Amino acid sequence: MLYRIARRLPSSHSDSLRIIARKEDRAIALVAGLFILLVVPAIAGDYVLSALLIPFLILSIAAIGLNLVMGYAGQASLGTGGFMAVGAYTSYKLATNIPEIPIVLDFFLGGLAAALAGILFGLPSLRLKAFYLAISTLAFQFFAEWLFSKVSWFWNDNASGVVSIPAFDVLGITIEGPRQSYYLVCAIVAIMTLAAVNLMRSHVGRRWMAIRDNETAARLMGISVPAAKLQAFAISSFYCGVAGALWSFVYLKTLGVSSYSIDISFKIIFMIVIGGMGTILGSFIGAAFVLLMPVVLNAVTVALSLPIDTGSVSSLEQIFFGVLVIYFVLVEPRGIMHLLGKLHKKLVSWPLNIGR
Amino acid sequence: MNASEFPTPPLPTPPLPTNDASIRQALVAVQGVSLSFGGNTVLSNVDLNVRSGEIYSIIGPNGAGKTSLLNCINGFYKPTAGRISFDDKDMSRLSVSRLARMGVARTFQNLALFRDLSTIDNLLLGRNLMMKTSFAQAAWYWGATRNEELNHRAAVEETVHLLQLAGVRDATVGRLSYGTQKRIEFGRALASRPKLILLDEPMAGMTQVEKSEMSAFIRTANKLLDVTVILIEHDVGIIMDLSDRIAVLDRGVKIAEGSPRQISTDESVIAAYLGTDH
């Protein structure tokens, strides 16, 4: 029996406040953490690190960000790419014009700029709901794309719209190889994930979820609904902003507005829908799924030596993707996390549930 | 052998004078309140005095304006005319959350729970206004916010115990039975330790057993937590048992007010409910 609930139920209030309730699960998490930090960089090749794991970790931050506003606070947003762009361009301006600021601080200042944009463009949420709010955030997405492609000041008036990012160092170590980048991203992801988890299990998250579930009742609890909504937009955009900065600085090493188009907004929405709305872990699972699926699909066609050219594979990918999203929206709107939860329940009562 | 040979058990000690609602002052005073939407008059010139510590019921036929009156007391509606005071302070222009801060809690006729949250989280949201740690402390969690969570968790556990919710403590409320959800909503209101609680048909749609349980909970909360209750209910039997005083509304006008005994014999009430021959 892998899972037991006997003698594993919380027996004190402090037990019930743990991030991971079950002891076995905590052990699994610890092993996974050590694996990620020690084993993965040792065995993974440069390609896996820089083309799979680093973008996965960075987009996980963005997915957490969107999940905060959409999954927890219940406010639809299509502007993720725009907020990422604000973070990226702010970091770039700061890094190139004020080199005295440590680069990691630039990322977080980029996040802060995105948070301000989030508050400003979260204002419609005080009046609009669901679909209409989504449209107004879509307007922000297009505004951001327009702004960062037309105003050349943002990329220091370079001749080309796509500028390369100079090498930078963190704590005296120049970030050049994929392993250094990986550790840098891991550290930022760890801090931001922990903060998100803590916020969501405190009164802050509880207020957001209250607004999501019932605005009238939330008011009755003395929650200031407008303040909480703007707070959710600000924090969400902060996460997206930091992710946007890392996307350019650590992953792409170039900065161009096309990396922050509506495509990436949708990609991140798919991540949280597939992974699980209103769960932090679901953001990671969704990000892994969306990023790994094309790779797996490619590997499968190669392994089966199917007579399909690469162009068709990428079309196949799109089709497969669309089908999956429709499946999740229709059949499992709570995403992979919900599926895992069901599996977990079965494991807990195994083998007594055999045949049921 | 006659009854006098048996020793009579000692009488229970009379309740403390503070528990006697009749000598307490008014907690809620509704004075000449009128409410209309466009040309549609919902309440006209209603006066009520709810004394501290009593269970005060509002009854009346459908469309009499009972819920609208609660909405006025609660701050969802602003009365067109008149004044509502709470604890001797004018509250007819205050917002819902401001009133929550002053100690007014509420349940709804059609439930207004946070459906995707657990019972415990719903109850903890009832104590939302008492949670004061900052955003930064919440992001760090350990220390101040964790202690705060622990304290409120312990406090909420009292409500769980009082309303016998232990079995559904961690269940998602949206999946629970209607009667249980009603109880949780009452618990959420109680968790804020309010001075005044407004219950809009807390027993609607319940079975007879659930209704008597709910009445017991309301009475226990009233006596034990010293909370004043304003109640809307259609089950006249329960109303007569539970209430200290009753007001009857009909088409936005208060037609009677008094003890259950007075109300049950009042002719205008009988007329409003059953109709009269003209």
Image (cartoon, coloured by chain):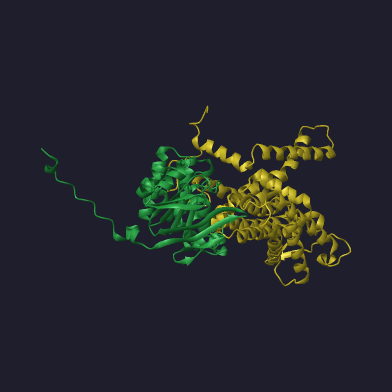
Residue at position x 49%, y 60% from top? B32
Q: Give the farthest residue toward the front.
A: B278
Residue A12 visible from this viewpoint: no
Residue B61's x, y, as percent?
Answer: 49, 45
Residue at position x 58%, y 50% from top? A214
* Position of residue A225 in the picture relative to residue A150 (left or right): left
The tint of chain A in the picture is yellow
Residue A176's x, y, as percent?
Answer: 75, 59
Foreground of the two, A148 or B219? B219
Is residue B262 depicted above or below B207 in this figure?
below
Q: Quadrant of residue B152?
A: bottom left
* Position of residue A314 in the picture relative to residue B122 (left or right): right
* Position of residue B246 in the picture relative to residue A70 (left or right): left
Residue A321's x, y, as percent?
Answer: 74, 40
Q: Provide the letter of the chain coloured green.
A: B
Q: Quadrant of residue A329?
A: top right
Residue B211's x, y, as percent?
Answer: 41, 41
Is residue A61 depicted above or below B169 in this figure?
below
